[in-house]
Amino acid sequence: MSDVGKRSTLFETRFTFGAGMDLITKDQARAGKIMQRVHPHGPAHSFNILTTDPDDHNHNNHRRIYQVKVGDGSTAGLDATDANMAYVASIAAGTDLSIGEFLLDIGGSWTVVDASLYTPNMNSVTTGQDVTISYAVGDFIGPEYQESVQIATGETMQTQSISVAANFSALRPRLSREIQGIQGILGLGPSHIEQEAIFSDSAAEEEFGKLLISLTFSQNGLHGTLTFTKPDDSSYTGDLVYVPVTSVLPAADYWGIDLAVSYGGDIPLIPRGTGVIDPSTVLTLLGEQAYEQYKLRVGATEDSETGLLVITQVKHANLQPLIFTIGDTALELPVEAHILPLAITERVGLHPGKIYLAIGSLGHSEGSGPDVIMGYTWLRWFCTVLTRRVRRVVEHSDTHAEKTVTTGKMFVDHIQIAIARAAFAPAATNQ
């Protein structure tokens, strides 16, 4: 089996929104948190790390609290537990390696395990510290271990820190009904602090110092593949377009890129701006001015029951693609991607005789935040690669409980995003 095959795992998409207005209002509420730089998890997240006095040897008092620094001093509230979309994969954590359902957190860097489902053994290494990790649904609290994490193909990740949350079961009812059965949260995101390797130092070296996480979706969008290396060539067409994460706030705090957006290739909606790739958002959300221009061009109206855009059959026949210019490359969001997928319209209970669009409003004007958020209905048409380029790898040893644990630590130099058209997407039209 190739490294691509071994280092890939299937995931399932789950819609965690309710009916009617919930879809657009929850997406816009999440966009509002991005505007406010509420981000416990993301490419540039930073932590307040609180510990007791290092000379205090009472291990019962040792506690690390991981909580985001945000611009307005507000508490954590934007992550995979508070989203319209959820992604679940089969993961094994711990040396017993029993497979369970884990929520994928593309932005987070911690792996959290339900303590009631985890039993340490002679190979488990405790750090002697309790860890508190803040999520939107609450704080997961429990001891920290150095443990093995394995994906469904049997490939084992580099030994890493996990939080064995004693209160996981207590917080479970706060999760959306569709993900209340998860056994843990797998953090996959980078940070600008030291970051553990996903698999091994050699894996990083063979990718020329890059750590890659690739996301691709099935044609119906209900499943996908998460790959911990460069994606298989068969999953996309054309070339992967690599661009750095933007330096413009607040998009720089997330998976944000510089871009331009036009309708039909010749009508600019966003001549120059920033976009945020957010798998946890459902719609493609445009800033208010771009949204009004788009609504005018496609001849759409807002549905009074849902707030979603709707069009007639005649207008549908005249739709043009949206062109996202990223770097020097124009990527086409096809006409089919304008339409809200059947899986979502049935989930929300929308009127079967209406044509609902997957484009919505951010709820704010351009310039006051990201100009566009590319959610699930955008991502499913592309192969997306989230990349951490490593500046250097060092080995260090920590001794806990008379055992020595050596792990490769990655110091992040910069972060890139690569995008290509999904293999199943229709060929680009000539503009």
Image: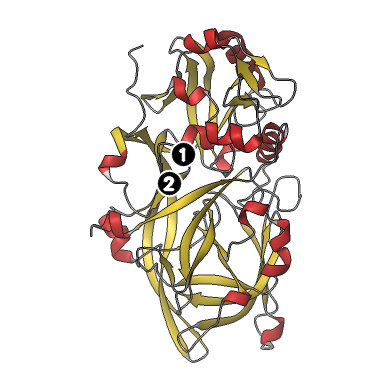
Residue that numbered label 1 is attached to: 221
- Residue 44 visible to the viewer: yes
- Quarter of the image with the C terminus is top left
Report how far apart the C-alphas of labels 1 and 2 lie in the structure.
Answer: 7 Å
Which residue: 63% across, 23% down?
287
Identified by mark 1, the residue type is Gly
Give residue 411's position: percent from left, percent from top: 44, 59
Q: Is residue 55 left or right of residue 275?
A: right
The disc at residue 248 is: none
Near-viewer residue (216 or 384): 216
Q: Is residue 297 above or below residue 152?
A: above
Q: Is residue 30 left or right of residue 269?
A: right
Which residue: 46% across, 52% down?
11
- Residue 276 visible to the viewer: no
Q: Is residue 343 left or right of residue 74?
A: left
Identified by mark 2, the residue type is Gly
Residue that numbered label 2 is attached to: 224
Q: Are marks 1 and 2 in contact (CB under 8 Å)?
A: yes
* Label 2 packing within 10 angstroms: few (<14), some (14-19), many (20+): many
